[in-house]
Image: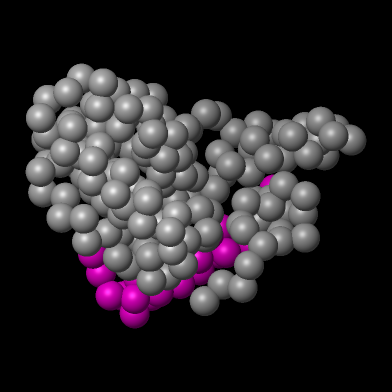
């Protein structure tokens, strides 16, 4: 509790310094949360040629709306919400799709053995997974990636996306079924998603 209280006070003081226009405080906030914002965007969007622009957009929104932080949630959670909104808007823009690299031939994978084969499976599995996610609606994709890939509890995901736990759970379920259907017809994706596989993308947890 003392650590939480200390972190809370530190966040409040840092935000106050940012609002007074102190450059050092602005740099400090960016330094503290840069990896967090990148991680959130990366898990939702995958490898993306617009990542630098999205990162910049997210922090512009953070600093422009910083006065609106009411300290009801931690600063980190509030920054997460901003990142989710940026990802949602990006995914919702008509005609804009995640750029994925060309998939390699299945037989080429089968011919490779040892650690290199696992690395290749991981790379190709990620590409195939995000190709399937690209077919989902923005809300379903965000709910699925935050819960299934990032390992966040449903309640936290629901809070971040501004939805009910029930609606969020339904979106995750529908997205999971979409991924499972694709995997049933794709042995590479199926092996990649296997919870027993060394390169499984999903956290080792009981999914609710």
Residue 25 placement (x, y as % from top left): 25, 27
Give the quadrant of residue 168.
bottom left
Residue at the right extreme, as displayed = 114
Q: What stretch is highlighted in magenta?
A: 162-188
Q: Which residue is drawn at 74% across and 34% down?
A: 119
Residue at 52% of width from left, 59% of height from top?
A: 151
Where 142 falls versus 87 (above or below)?
Answer: below
Q: Nearer the viewer, residue 17 or 191?
A: 17
Q: Where is residue 56 in the image (x, y as percent from the top left)?
A: 26, 26
* Magenta span contains residue 127: no
Question: Vertically, is 103 above or below 75?
Answer: above
Q: Is residue 125 left or right of residue 1?
A: right
Tell me if residue 186 can be seen. Answer: no
Q: Is residue 187 magenta?
A: yes
Q: Would you place residue 93 above or below residue 137 in this image?
A: above
Image coords of residue 59 (percent x, y)? 24, 32
Q: Is residue 11 visible?
A: yes
Magenta: main secondary structure equals helix
In the image, 200 versus 2, the foreground residue is 2
Q: Which residue is drawn at 73% across and 53% down?
A: 191
Classify residue 65 as left or right of residue 132. left
Q: Residue at x 10, y 43 (%)?
A: 67
């Amino acid at each position: 509790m003392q650590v939480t209280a200390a972190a809370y006070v530190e966040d409040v003081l840092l935000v106050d310094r940012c609002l007074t226009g102190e450059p050092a405080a602005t740099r400090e906030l960016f330094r503290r949360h840069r990896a967090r914002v990148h991680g959130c965007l990366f898990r939702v969007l995958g490898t993306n040629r617009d990542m630098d622009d999205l990162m910049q957009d997210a922090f512009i929104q953070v600093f422009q709306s910083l006065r609106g932080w009411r300290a009801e949630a931690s600063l980190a959670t509030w920054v997460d919400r901003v990142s989710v909104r940026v990802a949602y808007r990006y995914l919702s823009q008509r005609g804009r799709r995640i750029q994925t690299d060309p998939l390699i031939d299945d037989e080429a994978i089968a011919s490779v053995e040892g650690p290199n084969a696992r690395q290749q499976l991981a790379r190709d599995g990620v590409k195939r997974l995000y190709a399937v996610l690209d077919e989902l609606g923005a809300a379903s994709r965000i709910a699925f990636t935050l819960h299934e890939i990032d390992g966040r509890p449903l309640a936290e995901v629901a809070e971040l996306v501004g939805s009910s736990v029930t609606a969020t759970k339904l979106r995750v379920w529908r997205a999971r079924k979409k991924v499972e259907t694709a995997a049933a017809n794709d042995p590479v994706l199926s092996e990649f998603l296997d919870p027993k596989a060394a390169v499984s993308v999903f956290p080792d947890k009981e999914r609710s």
